[in-house]
Image: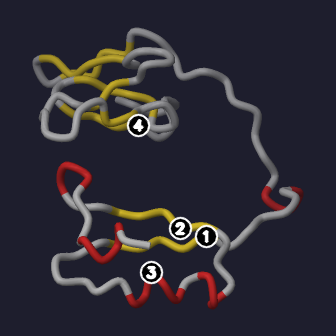
Amino acid sequence: MARGLGCTVAMNDRIHVARFVRRAHVTSPGAPSSPSCGPLGWVTEGYVRAAVGPPLLRALRLDRVPDVVPVALAQAALGDGGRLLRALPGLGYRGTVVEAMGGGHLPRSWASP
């Protein structure tokens, strides 16, 4: 039923365009929102209802992307001492995306300089 809608996020009966969905609250189960454009549609009585189509986005050819820098993905875990996080710059990474725990919590060792 969602063919042609692109990549979507469906949660709490609402459908969002994945590119624009954000977590609006760290603990609320109704947290997903799309502040820049609103939900794409909803799920009701077993049917997908799309109120609008996804915005047309210009395709980006990956072979023409200039200056792609290496970025690491680091997953936080209880008891993690942060050794891997501190080693990332020495491994050539110029940025890090941190997958934190619920509520945005991190081990204390990750937050200290």
Give the number of the disc on residue 71. Answer: 1
Camera-side mark, 3 or 1: 3
- Asked whether the beta carbons under mark 2 and mark 1 sit within 8 Å of each other, the answer is yes
Give the number of the disc on residue 24. Answer: none
Above or below — where is 101 with respect to 112? above
**Quarter of the image where one finds residue 64:** bottom right
Marks 3/2: CA–CA distance: 8 Å
Q: Nearer the viewer, residue 103 or 22?
A: 103
Disc nearer the start of the sequence (4/2): 4
Measuring from the top left, give residue 89's x and y in whole percent.
62, 82
What amino acid type should be assigned to the residue bearing mark 4?
Thr
What amino acid type should be assigned to the residue bearing mark 2?
Thr
Disc nearer the start of the sequence (1/4): 4
Above or below — where is 11 with respect to 45? below
- Asked whether the beta carbons under mark 3 and mark 2 sit within 8 Å of each other, the answer is yes
Q: Could you tell me which residue is drawn at 22 percent across and 31 percent down?
A: 31
Marks 4/2: CA–CA distance: 25 Å
Give the colouring mode of the picture. secondary structure
Camera-side mark, 1 or 4: 1
Marks 2/1: CA–CA distance: 5 Å
What amino acid type should be assigned to the residue bearing mark 3?
Leu
Q: Is residue 2 left or right of residue 28?
A: right
Measuring from the top left, give residue 110's x and y in whole percent.
35, 73
What amino acid type should be assigned to the residue bearing mark 1?
Val
Q: Nearer the viewer, residue 92 or 5?
A: 92
Number of other residues with Cα within 10 Å of mark 1, as a class: few under 14, some 14 to 19, many 20 or more: some
What residue is pinned by disc 4?
8
What residue is pinned by disc 2?
96
Q: Could you tell me which residue is drawn at 44 percent across and 73 percent down?
A: 113
Q: Dot 4 lies on which element? A: strand
Q: Could you tell me which residue is drawn at 22 percent across and 61 percent down?
A: 101
What residue is pinned by disc 3?
85
